[in-house]
Amino acid sequence: MSLERAQLGLTAAIAATCIVSIFAAQVLLALAVLVFLARLATGRARVARLPLDGAILAFSVWTLLSASFSPDPVASHESAKKLVLFALLYVALDSFGVERERERILDAALLGGLVLGAGSLLQYYFLGFDTLQNRPRSFLGHYMTAAGLSMGVLVLAAARLVFRREALALPTRRDWRALSLLAGTLGAVALLRGSDLLVLESERLFVAGLAAAAAAMALSRGAWPGPGTSTALTVLVLPLCSWALLVSRTRNAWLGTIAGLTVVACLRAPRALWLLPAGLGAILILRPTPIVERLTVMDASSRDRFYMWHAGLDMIRDKPVFGQGPGMIQTVYPDYRWPEAPNPMAPHLHDNFLQIAAERGLPCLAWWLWLMTAAVAGAWREARRGPFGAGWGAVAALAWLTALLVAGLFEYNFGDSEILMFTLLVAAVPYAVARQRDSAPLPA
């Protein structure tokens, strides 16, 4: 197998596993980076120059400076190691060069989203993950991460469905057989978890199989996977992840999803925005319990965020240049906690903007805003150029970045490695589409 195809298979496996297992995704990323470096050394690849380069460099350098001035530099540098995940942006961009391969990698991401949504629903209905204190998280470690990724996959699927180039192709028998095998395997894993038997082993084996399946989908030279496969994954992800998002009871993800879908609607059919008040009306009439019980700002979680944000502002006033240090918020929070805050501890400040400023300083917040603005601008330019066909990925990137920022007003989702990897993967799509268009031969 050539290095190019090895990198393609690894990127597809990352796309699927970053939604269900951060350990597997990071191992696969390390392998993909090694392959990419080997291709660079042999002259078979080059690092693309992006408008994001300066922002990523400034954000990374200031993060390391902040870690050096931290009260515990060793712990802060350990926390700052997430910066290596930015390598995924360049690996993905290189792997996205051909539309057929790009579509298959995004199919792999939807496959991971299908597993995420189905796993959450199995937990909710059969494994007791059905209370506010014990919410479904599928294969992930925290329900917030699961809800955030459900939001991302849902927005991705919606953009693909709305901006498809051709009519939907019907799934083939092979598609249905593969989906049946997936459902059966997921059911077996859920049964083992419910029986408390070989839980860790079965989940690891399942994730390994998922990575292998994603790589095989990307590397296949035959007719399968085909348009019908993309249809099946896209159409199934929409209801499964929507329902998983609903039962997650995660308000920031609900708001982010609404924002992301609004972007898709505005670019495709602004009149569809009338569905938003219609949906809100349906909620008021039907009053589903998972939603109604969360429609309040007077609960302990909301009040804790209010006082937590005040503590964050105090942290920024105290150390505005280099911040408290990466990974130090939980350590220093008791010193800044307001007496009215319900919880004595906080792992982070539940807001991307406050967290980055308090943790790494106001200059680092400026670099992060530069990064996000450049990514949104790149996606917007490509989405406006031609959203149908290959350009649907630019719409998906724009919608996802919008959802991330809106949800990030109430959650530090940029700090989740899984969500960061998904963000970098999707953010690479508009630049890949632009590169493919610019390198295409001019018509005779």
Image (cartoon, helix red, strand yellow):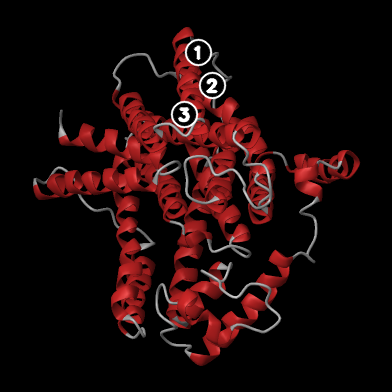
Look at label 2 and name its amino acid.
Answer: Ala
Is label 1 in contact with label 2 (beta carbons under 8 Å)?
yes
Tell me if 240 is positioned left or right of 218 in this view.
Answer: right
Q: Quadrant of the N terminus?
A: top left
Say which label, 3 or 2, has the lower sequence index.
Answer: 3
Q: Residue at x 40, y 79 (%)?
A: 325
Q: Residue at x 29, y 25 (%)?
A: 219
Pick the residue in front: 33 or 438: 33
**Picture quarter containing residue 296?**
bottom right
| Label 3 SS | helix
The Cα–Cα distance between marks 3 and 1, rounded to whole angstroms, is 24 Å
- Packing grade of label 3 (10 A; few <14, some 14-19, many >=20) is some
Is label 3 in contact with label 2 (beta carbons under 8 Å)?
no
> Which residue is at the far right?
285
Say which label, 3 or 1, has the lower sequence index.
Answer: 1
Q: Quadrant of the C terminus?
A: top left
Mark 3 sits on what residue? 192
Q: Residue at x 38, y 71 (%)?
A: 59
Image coords of residue 364 (percent x, y): 43, 77
Look at label 3 and name its amino acid.
Answer: Leu
Tell me if 5 is positioned left or right of 66 in this view.
Answer: left
- Packing grade of label 2 (10 A; few <14, some 14-19, many >=20) is many
Image coords of residue 45 (percent x, y): 19, 45
Give the label on residue 232, or none: 2
**Residue 275, visible in the rendered structure:** yes
Mark 1 sits on what residue? 176
Look at label 1 and name its amino acid.
Answer: Trp
